[in-house]
Amino acid sequence: MSFSQILPGQAAKAALTIRGASLWPGLLDPDAQAALMADVARIWAAAPPRQLLTRWNKPLSVSMSAAGACGWTSDRRGYRYAPTQDDGNPWPPIPEALLALWRAVVPEAQAPDSLLVNLYRGRARMGLHQDRDEADFGQPVVSVSLGDAALFRIGGTERGDPTESVWLNSGDVLVLAGSARLAFHGIDRIREGSSNLVPGGGRVNLTLRVAGCG
Ligand SMILES: O=C(O)CCC(=O)C(=O)O
Ligand SMILES: [Fe+2]
């Protein structure tokens, strides 16, 4: 993939901002999206997606997998980054194409040590939340959308702050950094069948973070 040639120029100029978050619509072309989907299939072969339980013993509607030195997980003990899968196996590596994308869009940041792979099907959604299980909020969060479109909502650093919504489409890249790093955000719904990129349908979201385990 040719991120290293295309991206630095584009990454400097192509962003829209929404509540302080940077959005690059369509940064990944269809070939890059298909190659990333093949990377996701390899991650799923080593770490199958599953509906994690919350502290309240309720399953999340999104199915999750992970890659990297640690993987975000949830169970009755709460949310955390785990150094291995439940069966003790290591998480698969973060795909090289995503590491290259990270370097292109957030060149000043430390390398990511964790990738969360979210699968949304049917009525899956993600309630408004902050990403705050990481060690250093000075490091950004980079998220890539693949497959069906999703209605993304973002507000401020207080739960009651006003929010704005935008449809995220396949190939879009979003960065939460600076004042938006701790912004509340979530996914209200997906538009099922709006893409056929994901085998079996739905939407995949890839979120790269510096958890602090690398
Ligand atoms: O699916 C998305 O676009 C957002 C996912 C997210 O916010 C998260 O996994 O923390
Ligand atoms: Fe999040």
Image (cartoon, grey):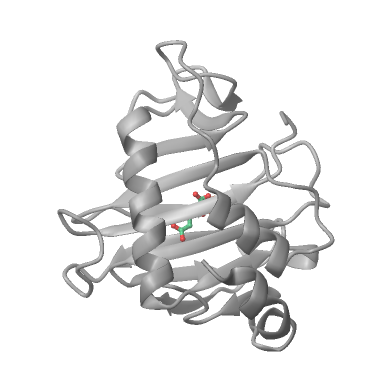
For residue 143, side relative to residue 63 (left or right):
right
Q: Quadrant of residue 171?
A: bottom left
Q: How many marks?
A: 0
**Relative height, residue 7 to residue 86 (above, below):** below
The location of residue 201, given as percent across then percent down, is 18, 59
Identify which residue is drawn at 74% across, 63% down. Answer: 177
The location of residue 155, given as percent across then percent down, is 60, 68
For residue 72, side relative to residue 17 (left or right):
left
The location of residue 153, given as percent across then percent down, is 49, 69
Q: Residue furthest top?
A: 88
Which is more toward the observer, 49 or 151? 49
Q: Quadrant of residue 53?
A: top left
Q: Quadrant of residue 134?
A: top right
Identify which residue is drawn at 65% across, 47% down. Answer: 209
Identify which residue is drawn at 34% across, 64% down. Answer: 34
Kindly tell me whether residue 170 is visible in this rendering: no
Which is more toward the observer, 53 or 23? 23
Kindly tell me whether residue 95 is visible in this rendering: yes
**Relative height, residue 203 to residue 30 (above, below):** above
Identify which residue is drawn at 24% across, 71% down. Answer: 191
For residue 175, side relative to residue 204 (left or right):
right
The location of residue 165, given as percent across then percent down, is 48, 77
Quadrant that contains the C terminus: top right
Which is more toward the observer, 123 or 81? 81
